[in-house]
Image: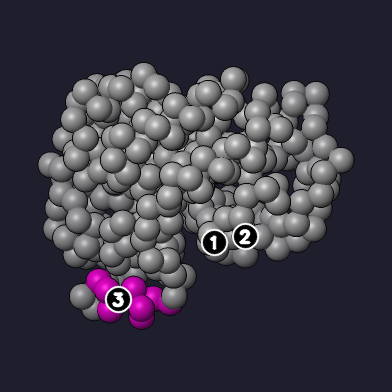
Amino acid sequence: MFEIVRFVDIGCQLICKDKASFTFDENQYIVCNRKSFYFCLMYSELIQYSEPLFRPPSEARSLILQTAIGCSWNRCAFCEMYTSKKFRIRKEDDIFHEIDLMSTYASHIRKVFLADGNAIVLSFDKLMKIIEKLNNSFPNLKRISAYALPKDINAKTDYELKKLADAGLKLLYIGIETGDDELLKIINKGETYHTTTEALIKARKSGIKLSVMILNGLGGKQFSKQHAINSARVVNEVQPEYLSTLVLSFPLGIDHFKKRFSNTFIEISKIDLISEMGNFIGALELENTIFRSDHASNYLILKGVLNRDKDKLLSDITKVLSNPEQSDLRPEWMRGL
Ligand code: SF4
């Protein structure tokens, strides 16, 4: 039995709060006694995280290792994830010390997620040293992943990306947000359609899988149609392994967002968000992409493989649009924002 002092899992956000104990289950994963889901070693008292700490929902069982604090860009109009943090790359000694601390649990660690907002901004040499240390420390390690910005990928050579992939960097999570150049500029993403496709195709060619995110409602009423169509275009060009959509939210209030959006933003209704999803999915031409809109922010939960399940997803959307009152939309109180 171990004692941990913190956790609450809300979508992809981790908040340290509570006291709980946990045990290993038959699969050698840690099971927490306060919630019946598998839990990872990140909640061990061994690592003192700089919070807030974020990870994708699919990294719930991974060891989270902060290689940097914050996001090196930290300027997107809609994002407050790391605005409380001044960006810095952590010292190698500190990172290695945390890896050493986990040696007791070495055989249980199968996946490692490199935090915070864009660990791939680290130089090739630094990343390779960290990955080598992880491989040497955790004999059952199967996957290393991280959030990345297109500009971080474009700053690496094809050779470097291939070396990182071969060493164990298997998956990158990338918030494309939108494929629309006009909107990318307004939200201050620091990327364009071209820089995004260039980076993502480069990463895929090196053998790194991609999980990309599009932000439903990002352009409000004014940009809804072009946001949907150009987001589908960028995804079609990249053909990522995984695609998800989240719904734009306003953690510091809509007025705060509007100020950062040049004051022209007009929020779209719940039904218009779903209509935008219909335009987006309708324009997708994918070979084999796992699609999810099941993040806590989504009103309508959609899941499938695209394009295989495109007709089914579009029919689900049509049903909601034709009879919104009878639809099974996630109520506001369950959105966990
Ligand atoms: S690049 Fe990502 S983490 Fe950084 S500010 Fe933009 S959305 Fe937030």
Question: Percent x, y for residue 176?
Answer: 29, 46
The front one of 37 and 162 is 162
Q: Can residue 103 be seen at all in this image of the molecule?
A: yes
Whole-Å distance between the Cαs marked 1 and 2?
8 Å
Task: Choose top left, top right, bottom left or bottom right for residue 189.
Answer: bottom left
Q: Magenta segment range? A: 253-261
Q: Nearer the viewer, mark 1 or mark 3?
A: 1
Question: Mark 1 sits on what residue?
Answer: 51
**First reached walking from the N terminus: tag 1 or tag 3:** 1
Are the residues flagged by discs 1 and 2 in contact, CB closer than 8 Å?
yes
**First reached walking from the N terminus: tag 1 or tag 2:** 2
Q: Mainly helix, strand or loop, the magenta region?
A: helix
Quadrant the N terminus occupies = top right
At mark 3, the secondary structure is: helix
The front one of 292 and 143 is 143
Decide if residue 181 is on the left or right side of residue 110: left
Decide if residue 307 is on the left or right side of residue 81: left
